[in-house]
Amino acid sequence: MRVRWRAGLLACLMAGVLGVAAPSQAGAVSAAVTDQRALVQEALDAMVAAGAPGVLARVDDPHGHWIATSGVADLRTGEAVPRNARFRVASLTKSVIATIVLQLAEEDRLSLDRPVGAWLPGIVAGADRITVRQLLNHTSGLADYVAHPEFKDAMVYGGRTYRPEQLIGYAEELGPVSEPGQRFAYSNAGYIVLGLLVERVTGDRLETEMSRRVLRPAGMSHSYLPLTEPAIRGPHATGYYLPAGVDPGAPGALRPITELNPSFAWAAYGLVSDARDINRFYHALFGGQLVGEGSLRQMREGVGTPQAPVFPYYGLGLEAAGLTCGVTWGGTGSIPGYQTMAFADRSGTRRMTLSMNVQRRDPAVAPLLMAGVDALNRYFCGTSYSVPR
């Protein structure tokens, strides 16, 4: 994405490319970054005011990196949000899974436009008609198993162990939402099927392939895919959750839910990471280190989503954010305890990851998420977000 810079700042950046910037030029860059951080900090404070106990933002770009936080890591102790906090990145996991699938396509070990039943016969009804590409871009017609009554209360299902086949079964009990290829309908079940596809094609466990193909090459040393392990390794904020039917204004309405059995998420939204590693992932992906140019172009071929104009497209495991200065690509995620937004410019040169230590599903989530979009817009565009007319 091309970002509109002030002429003076552009001159400073060019000086940095051609040689060592003069002291006055370096000072101008430093002042611009300081102004940018102040703009973002205002948005983070607004996120806390909108209902997040705490929030963390990390930026990585040619100037280096910086971290900003607001609120607290724990409502009981008032502890500050760790600057290197790990968290459940939720559906950003899908970007990693899609990357692995595209790698396997590049190796001619699978084809995006063949039915998934060619490798996993009978895995779902219609497996002979649902293509791998349709699973990747949520046009398979599979229901989202999270809508099943089994997953009404995270305080309950977060204590159970699920097999991938069980999760797919819950989606099938809901019935298809459309014929394959007919329309976009977000489905975590599709990515559970893709996780099984990776294991079938490679003959190895998903977490092993994830580490070998993505985490290690991208330098994501703080990331891992837990299976049933309830705790988050390393520094982290307490995750909070608003149970269904609880008055959000009541004292203690937000319940701590940091530890849970993540088997319900697996390939769809189970990854644990931190902001540094997520920024490293999109830098490696968009920089051509993980898949080729043709694959990356396909990953960005978006289908329309119901969340336009803020998130107007969903590609193959990638989500577009329509900011006031153009489109960035990355992902959003929500899981009991945490919500995440992470986006980068087209080349992966400028990246920003936001993590909130709460999942809300009440009306208060709308201003919270819009404050997060505002933080992204302030970094990438240098101005507050306004919905395009």
Image (spheres, rainbow, N blue to C red):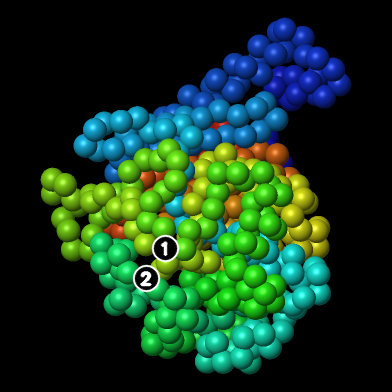
Would you identify the image quadrant in which residue 228 lies? bottom left
Q: What percent of the width, then of the height, locates residue 185?
A: 50, 75
Q: Dot 2: what SS?
A: loop
| Residue shown at the point (78%, 51%) measured from the top left | 288
Q: Amino acid at mark 1?
A: Thr
Question: For this view, does 153 lie left or right of residue 37?
Answer: left
- Residue at image location 71% in from the left, 49% down from the top: 217
| Kind of residue at badge 2 | Thr
> Which quarter of the rendering shows the N terminus?
top right
115 vs 215: above or below: below
Q: Is residue 334 rendered to the left or right of residue 222?
A: left
Residue 384's label in the rendered image is: none
Callout 1: SS: loop
- Which disc, if any, is residue 228? 1
Q: Is 291 left or right of 172, judged from the image as shown?
A: right
Q: Is residue 100 above or below residue 356?
A: below
**Would you say residue 194 is visible in this rendering?**
no
Instruction: For residue 125, say whether it is visible.
Output: yes
Is the Cβ of the residue at disc 2 closer than 8 Å to that at disc 1?
A: yes
Q: Which residue is disc 2 drawn over?
A: 161
**Residue 366 % position (x, y):** 35, 52
Identify the residue at horizontal 75%, vertical 19% (top origin): 12
